[in-house]
Structure formats: C-alpha cells, structure tokens
Image (tube, grey):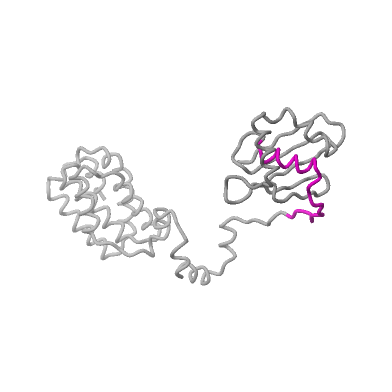
Amino acid sequence: MEIETNISNIDELIPEEDFLEYVEDEFTYQIKERGIAYYKNGHVIKCVKNKNNYLAKVRGSSSAPYKVQIYNMADGLAFKCTCPCDFPCKHIYATILAIANQEYEIVNLKKEIKEHKSNLQSIIEKIPAEKLKEYLLSPLGLGYVCFEVTNFENYFREYLPRQSYEFYYNNLYNSLVLENEDNMLTSYINRIKSYLGSNDFNESFKIIKSIIEAYNDAGYLNFDDNIINIFSILTMIFRIIYKKSNLKLKEEINKWLEKVKNNNYYNNLYLEDMVSI
C-alpha cells in the first residue's frame, strides 16, 4: 500500500539540508531510529534527483527493494513509499537522510507518457475471427483463457453438444428424490431460453418434457413451489415452441400431450393451462 504525506505551509522550496528539520514531527522516535540504522547500514541502495523530485530504492524485509519518492514543492514536502506501512516509515526517513547528505545522482528524466489502454471488448473487435479461434484452440489458449462458464455456454448454446432426454430427466429426478435440486431447475430454464434463441425447438421441448416428467414421477409436480412458481414461464415457452415447430416436432408434442391428457396423474391446474394449446 502506498502512503503519501505533505508538510505544507512553506512559501518556497525547502533546502535539502533542512529536510530533517521540516519532517521532525512526522516520524515517531522508533521510526527515526530504525531509519537511521537503515541509512547507516547502506539500505538506501540508489537515490536519484530529477529537478526537485527524488526517487530512491531502499532494501527492506521483502525480496525486492521498496520505492520511495520525495517531492519538494512550493507548498512543502510530500513523500511516498511502496511498503505496507500506512504511516511515514523508516524507508522514507532513511532516504531523507541520504538527500540531506546529498548522496544522490542527478538525472534528467524524460516526460512521462501514459500507456494507451483499451478494454477486452475493443481488442477482440480488432482481432480477425480465425486468428482468435486459432489462439483459443492452441495449448496456450486452452491453458490460460478463462470464461464465466455458465454465461459462455448459454450464449453459445447452439454450438454445444446436444444431450439425451435421459440426461435431463435422470439428473433432475435424482436431485428431486435426494432433495438436492438446488439450482438445477433454473439451469434448465436458462438452457431452454438459449436454445430458443438459436431456434432449436427440438432441444427446448426435450428439456420442458423432462422437467414435467421428473417432477411428476418424483411426486413434486403439485406441491413444490419451485415448479409452481415457474409454470407461467413454462407455459409461455411451451406455446412458442409449439407455434414455431415443424410438422415432425408437432407430431411428437401432440403424442406427448395425449399421454398427459389420458393419464390423470397430471392433476395440476397449472399444467392443464400449459398444455391447452
């Protein structure tokens, strides 16, 4: 964490030999003693002056030296250190001692130029699709590129492998029986929506059918709030699927509806409304 402190109310730049006097009240006795020890033991391994600013590297407890910056400004001194302390530290005090004794190298630094930055979206927009695909499929891409998997899969659902009806039904049924449904129903709804977005009505119907069958066979169709609360969504989706289906899928849906209507175990008002096409 970087800390920065100002010693203000100074009308002009402070002479280097007076630095210690102006910061006298900024450091505790213990910090001063440690700073003196650091200075005497050669922990200030490099200090340079650029105009009225100073930059030093001070060896501390970490493997890499800490960076200390001292600014001599019209309104006083300011200093900063990259060590974890949230108060004026021994590294700063050791650097001030080096400056007061003029133990620094004078340099003329070039003007600081800010890096041109862009976000990931703007970068991807510029990369040709084939080059991006080549990288993602390379060992480097496979090993280091990460996605929020659920969102990624939902967006690119049309490119993912299709699952069997048994996959959806068995997993949901087992979770219900074990009372471990968690977010599986929400996941199924998201899958249906993503398949609808790519006009894959076959897969969408397969998932809806598995939901109704699994909840019925597990004995939860009429009593579980999770399924009851989403019946309005299922009804809307089911009617969209039926309306957009080709002749073959409509025949499959109608066959399943006959089973639903001919078996009284689907004694559910919400389901009755859903299948009233």
Where is residue 87 drawn, in percent x and y? 64, 33
Where is residue 122 drawn, in percent x and y? 59, 59
Q: Is residue 212 above or below residue 223?
A: below
Instruction: Report the side of 116 relative to 63 (left or right).
Output: right
Instruction: Report the side of 183 relative to 140 (left or right).
Output: left
Where is residue 175 drawn, in percent x and y? 22, 47
Residue at (31, 57) in percent of width and height: 204
Where is residue 215 drawn, in percent x and y? 20, 46
What range is drawn magenta here? 89-113
Looking at the rendered image, the quarter that the N terminus falls into is top right
Identify the residue at the far right of this view: 12
Residue at (22, 61) in percent of width and height: 252
Residue 61 belongs to magenta span: no
Residue 111 belongs to magenta span: yes
* Quarter residue 68 falls in: top right
> Looking at the image, which is closer to me, 194 or 181?
181
